[in-house]
Image (spheres, rainbow, N blue to C red):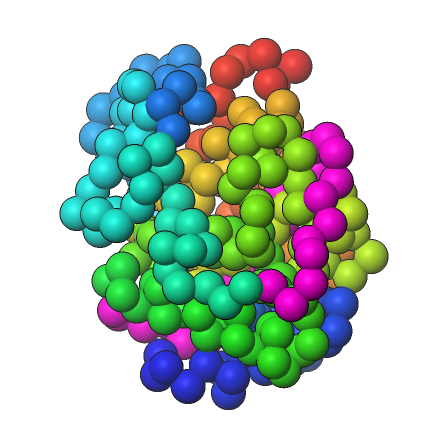
Amino acid sequence: MTTTFPSDLEGRDRDGNGRGRGGRHRGSGPGDVELSRRSVLTGGAVLVAGTGFVVAGALDLLPAGGPEKTAGEATRTANSWILGTAEWGARAPQRKMKVRSGPPRYIVVHHTSTRNVEDYSLARAQRLAQGIQKFHMDRRGWGDTGQHFTISRGGHILEGRHGSYAAARAGDMVVGTHVRGANDYTVGIECEGTYNALLPPRPLVQSLVRMCAWLCVQYDLNPRKAIVPHRKFNDTDCCGDRFAPTLPRLREEVAKVVPEKLLG
């Protein structure tokens, strides 16, 4: 992808709905999570059956004592494995964000419908986040980035809408602009790329499992019920004709690393 993001990010209407399926959807610490309760993911990377993608072991996703930093996460704060809005250079929101007391009901998975770039660097992820925010604010007239979190193809996790990380840690939710008619009870994750004909790369999937597991723990959500594609709510191809059918497997991978009490 070039850094001319508006041409890549066109297509969402004002309330965050994607285009119909005939077109393309456009986008846009320590002790927080318990370790795996099943041995199947405690080793190295494993193939997720039936999907063609690979996720890391639970010890990679949810390490003891809080997530370990990787080289790509060198600029993150001491207490967070998510790159905050200040750290990726976000503009101030144009208006105060509404915070909803209590948890959402769903974690909505999106794809940005941008090019499937091979640049997996942190710098690329920061430019992506900046470009999405610029498009959402300047072209769509939204107060801030529409979604709560963004995951780059390189697996870098970035806070989207201001305050999303702090609200989730408190068990609350900043109201986003990503799903028409359902923004008051959904938290959104944008996955960089277009997944109508292929699946996301391994680094993105690893981070998506990690992000979904953390949100399920923060919000006491059952991953088997809570993780859904954008197309559940709106007439859109999002999160991709190839990717969306694999979400049942994503739910199971998340279920393997969250506390068993969430699965009841």
Q: Quadrant of residue 247?
A: top right
Magenta span dominant secondary structure: loop
Q: Is residue 235 left or right of residue 78?
A: right
Residue 29 lies in the magenta stretch:
no
Q: Residue at x 59, y 12 (%)?
A: 261
Identify whether 245 is placed above or below 1.
above
Residue 71 visible within the image: yes
Which quarter of the figure is the N terminus placed in? bottom left
Considering every residue shown, the one lying at the far right of the view is: 181
Q: Quadrant of residue 179?
A: bottom right
Q: Residue at x 67, y 78 (%)?
A: 140
Residue 94 lies, in percent from the top left, at: 65, 68
Q: Residue at x 51, y 84 (%)?
A: 6
Residue 211 lies, in percent from the top left, at: 46, 40
Residue 35 lies, in percent from the top left, at: 37, 18
Which quarter of the figure is the C terminus placed in? top right
Q: Residue at x 68, y 70 (%)?
A: 142
Q: Is residue 36 left or right of residue 187?
A: left
Front-most of residues 261 and 125: 125
Residue 103 lies in the magenta stretch:
yes
Residue 79 lies, in percent from the top left, at: 35, 33
Front-most of residues 193 and 218: 218
Identify whether 262 is placed above or below 97.
above
Identify whether 41 is placed above or below 128.
above
Q: Is residue 17 left or right of residue 202?
A: right
Tell me the magenta residue range. 93-120
Front-most of residues 256 and 132: 132
